[in-house]
Image (cartoon, rainbow, N blue to C red):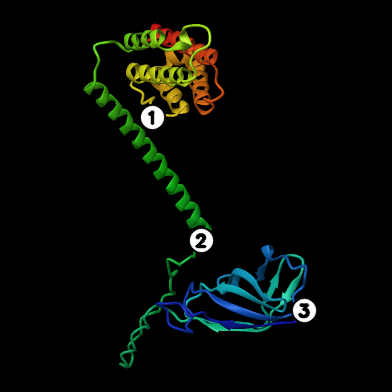
Amino acid sequence: MAVQCKVEIPNVQGLKDQELTVGREFLLVCDGEFPKTLQQDKLQLVLSPEQKYSIHLLGFEFRSPTQADLKVTSYVAGAQIKFDNLQLTDGTETLDLGQVQYQLVSVLPPPPPPSGKPGEQQPKQEPYGPVGPLAIPVPMVYWAILAGVVGLVILFAATKIFRSVQRRRTIERLKEHDSALSPLQEFHQKFRRMQRVNTVFFGGSPKKEDIPLALDETRQMLKLYITRRYKIPALEWSPRLIIKDLKKYHPKVYQETGVELEKLIKEFLHAVEDREKISGSDVLNLSKRARLLVEEMERLS
C-alpha cells in the first residue's frame, strides 16, 4: 500500500527549532491508504541490525483515516540518515513509507582545526561513545499512580499520628480528672444510681422519656469504663477502632470478650439511631448485658 511520509520536528522550549539531536523526538507525518485491520499495538519498523539505532518508533496515532503520525527518535550522533524505503509492519501486513531522510546534529563541539605545519601528523579521531542520559518521557498515568501512592502513605501516617495524639490526650485527661473510685467501682456506683431513679428498672411500664435516658447513660458508662480501664478513647472512637486497640494491647481480654463487646457496642449504636422505636425491655436487656460484660472484663484484666 502506497504511503508517503515527511519529517516534522515539533518545537520544544530550550531546543533549537528544526534541529535534530540525539534522543529528540520528531514526527513522520504519513499520508496514504492504511489497512483497516492494522494492529497499532504491534507496530514496529522493519530495520536491519545496523539501522536499529538510526530510528526508533515511540508511538503511532491517526490524524484521519488517511493520515497518521509516527513519533520517532534517533540515537546516532552527527549523521545524515536516509532510508530509500522505510517499512512499517504489525507482523501481518507491511506498509511502504517511501523515502525518509533527516540530518542529526552532534551535541559535541567540533574538533580543533589542523595546525597546518607540513609533516605534522594529526591526532586520530576516536569514535564517539554513547551520548546521554537520554530524556525518556514518563506517561502521565505513572505520575498519577505515584501521586496516589504517596497520598495514601501520607494519609495513613496522618491517621496513625492523629490516633496516637487522641490516646495521649485521653491519658492526660484521665490523670487530670482522676477519681478515687476504680473504673469498675465508678461503673457500679452510676449503675445503682440509675436503677434507683429511672423507671425502666422499676418493672411494669416505664416513663417514655426514661427509655432513651437509660439507653444513653448505660452506653456512656460502658464507654467510660473502657476509656479509664484500658486507656482507649472509646468516647470518640468507632466500634472497629475500639476492638482493634483492645486486640493489640489487651489480647487476653479481647480473646474472651471481644466478640460480645463489639456486638454490644453496635447494638447500642443501632438503638441510639432508632431510639423512637426501642422499648423499655430492650434497654433493660442492654443494660444488664453491659454490666455483666464489664464485670467479666474486669475479672480478666
Taking 222 as reference, is 236 above or below it?
below
**Corner quadrant of residue 180:** top left
| Residues packed near mark 3 inside 10 Å, few (<14), some (14 to 19) or many (20 plus) | few
- N-terminal of the two: label 1 or label 3? 3
Q: Amino acid at mark 2?
A: Met
- Where is mark 3, residue-wise? 1
Q: How far across and down, in percent of the image, does residue 207 sit? A: 48, 16
Percent coordinates x, y for residue 174 in the rendering: 27, 22
Outermost residue to the left: 176
Q: Tell me: 216 left or right of 116.
A: right
Mark nearer the viewer, 1 or 2? 1
- Identify the image quadrant of the N terminus: bottom right
132 to 14, vertically: above or below? above
Front in this rendered view, residue 277 or 270: 277
Q: Classify 10 Å Cα crowding around label 2: few (below 14), some (14-19), many (20 and above).
A: few
Label 2 vs 3, first from the N-terminus:
3
Distance of label 1 from label 2 (alpha carbons): 41 Å
Question: Is label 1 or label 3 in front?
Answer: 1
> Would you say the residues marked 2 and 3 are in contact, meaning their CB atoms lie under 8 Å apart?
no
Tell us which disc is closer to us: 2 or 3: 2
Q: CA distance from mark 2 to mark 3?
A: 35 Å
Q: Which residue is mark 2?
A: 140
Amino acid type shown at disc 3: Met
Residue identified by numbered label 1? 236
Foreground: 245 or 71?
245
